Amino acid sequence: MSTFCVEHGISRKTFYVLRARARVDGPAAVLEPRTKRPHTSPGQLDEEVKDQAVQVRAALEASGLDHGPISVHDRMKAMGLEAPSIAALARIFRERGVARLEPRKRPRASWRRFVYPAPNACWQLDATQYVLTNGRTCVIFQLQDDHSRLAVASHVAGSETAEAAIAVFNKGTARCGTPQRLLTDNGAALNPTRRGMKGQLVIHVTALGVEAITGKPYKPTTQGKNERFHQTLFRWLDKQPIAGSIEELQAQVDEFDVIYNEQRPHQGLRCRVVFGQWALLR
């Protein structure tokens, strides 16, 4: 037997296994390779669970909300459904063809995030353009807390003016108090200090003890949180009827802020953000 094992390059243990298989299934069974797949897979997901995950994702996408694996996982838990892990959901969506594989996308673990240490330490303010049904353009001012990503206040105006910027800032301070800093871009309506001018918004917030700061010119990544905030808003607005007036759009934006603050899970802090309740964010 030892000589046979040496000649065929197998161990004595393997020899005994093959001999036992030959006695049960016949000599021919020894020559057929067997799968190494386990007889049972306790962690394998049922097709029903996979179908539910795909349906929840489709519902989130249809409503204009974030529909990635994290969002689907949190929504399934909120609905009382069996929620697979976030990694399992990502595999399910790729298998079902509802999400594309992005091999060049940087993993989340590699991100170097900068965030202020506490709520009201810094707010970000920016405006984005929107087109009404009659072709008229307007702008949406979005004020966001840098630490918690809370939607502090939003304001729709006919154009990007200092008066509209002051209005949304005052709306935010009435709800959440006064921040230590206000970060904006270098636009004339927000903070033209780098251009050698003193803007009305800067004068207004400075009088309240707020430090007005800006990012470097042509570096929008400094206001990256607010840029991402715009993207989330427009994804939701795309699923709503196009507003015909500034008042109608303001009502839609206010509805979005409630959803963003009170209904959607907070992916950064892994908890639900309740509007105005800062104790949950500390």
Image (cartoon, grey):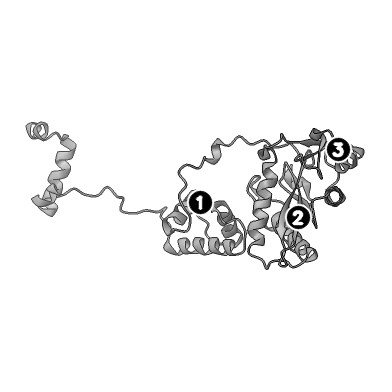
Quarter of the figure with residue 64:
bottom right
Total label count?
Answer: 3
**Residue topped by disc 1:** 85
The reply to whether residue 146 is in sight is: yes
The x and y percentages for residue 159 are: 80, 54
**Mark 2, secondary structure of its residue:** strand
Q: CA distance from mark 3 to mark 2?
A: 24 Å
Q: CA distance from mark 1 to mark 3?
A: 43 Å
**Residue topped by disc 3:** 210
Q: State if disc 2 and disc 1 touch (CB < 8 Å).
A: no
Q: State if disc 2 and disc 3 touch (CB < 8 Å).
A: no
**Residue topped by disc 2:** 139
The x and y percentages for residue 28 are: 9, 51
- Amino acid on which disc 3 is placed: Val
Residue at x-position 53% and y-position 53%: 69
User: Which of the marked residues, 3 or 2, is nearer the chain's N terminus?
Assistant: 2
